[in-house]
Amino acid sequence: MKRVVVLTGAGISAESGLKTFRDSDGLWEGYDIEEVATPQAWQRNPALVQEFYNMRRKSVIEAQPNAAHYALAQLQDKFDVTIITQNIDDLHERAGSTNVVHLHGIITRSQSSLNPELTYPMEGWELGMNEVCELGSPLRPHVVWFGEPVPMIEKAAAICATADVFILIGTSLAVYPAAGLVDFIPDGVPKYIIDPNIPYVRGANSVIKIEQKATTGVPQVVSELMNQPD
Ligand code: APR
């Protein structure tokens, strides 16, 4: 089976009603990264950080996967598919994708503020200030903040190195180390980029640009791949 590696960003969930970060009405227009998405923010004002992620968790739970998430799940019928996502939503899983690597964590789980390896499933959308992990330290959202290591990055890079086909969807490639993953895709491997605002990716000859929204562009690429001879 050919291996398809997909790297997704906030753009794939935009049409599910979840805001991107750097578009004109994006999340980072309304919030200061330093105030809500850093370990320092958590030290200074944990209640504000909890509130920010509680609101985001509520939006994620209320959102539904869209045609792009479903199309990627369909690819599994013919290919060995790994989705590497920068997104903290669970829409890939809810659409049926079974092999999803969450580079920046997943909002539907909480995490010990003492040991990042201790994570827990959550019931509802609200994480309270008085909830603690098994070590007795406060629970925080299971997300990777700016300035924190990205534990899954080496695994993700190794997966990229095995790709036969690469698909990049809805990411500005502004954030490292995630953005560096495209450099691990072997030369000559076809790289489909689906985004209304195509980011720069090296390797002009193998880049196929689809300048469209995810719900239009992704089903189109998936149907092209499904109809290719083995
Ligand atoms: N379909 C496809 N792509 C879209 C759509 C859409 N409907 N709408 C917007 N986009 C594209 C934008 O053109 C842009 O290239 O999605 C991308 C969104 O970029 P960012 O907002 O920078 O999001 P992302 O790349 O996922 O951000 C990376 O930054 O703040 C951190 O941790 C956060 O994981 C996130 C990381």
Image (cartoon, helix red, strand yellow):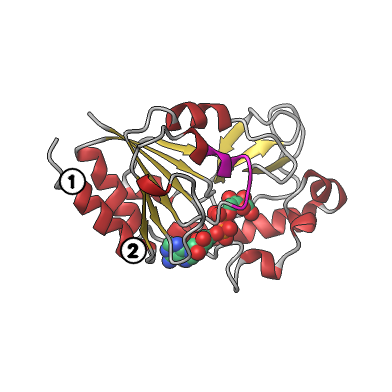
Quick check: 52 above or below 112? below
Please state which of the two labelled residues, at mark 2 or mark 1, is closer to the viewer.
1
Q: Position of residue 35 (x, y in %)?
A: 79, 57
Residue 57 position, x and y percent, is 57, 55
Residue 194 is marked as none
Please identify the quadrant where the N terminus is shown: top left
Amino acid type indicated by mark 1: Met
Question: Crowding near pointer 2: few (<14 within 10 Å), some, many (20+)?
Answer: many
Quadrant of the image occupied by residue 147 = top right
Which badge, 2 or 1, is on the more N-terminal residue? 2
Residue shown at the point (32%, 61%) measured from the top left? 217
Q: Is residue 123 magenta?
A: no
Write the residue at 36% across / 37% down: 188
10 Å crowding of disc 1: few (<14), some (14-19), many (20+): some
Answer whether residue 13 is visible to the viewer in this image. Answer: no
Q: What segment carries the magenta color?
A: 174-181
**Element type at marker 1?**
helix
Relative to 19, 65 lies left or right: left
Q: Which residue is mark 1?
A: 226
> What is the secondary structure assignment of the residue under circle 2?
helix
Q: Is mark 2 within 8 Å of ligand 1?
A: yes
Q: Is residue 93 left or right of residue 132?
A: left
Q: Indicate yes or no: mark 1 CB to ligand 1 under 8 Å.
A: no
Residue at the disc numbered 2: 215
Quadrant where the C terminus sits is top left
**Residue lying furthest bottom:** 25
Residue type beneath disc 2 = Thr
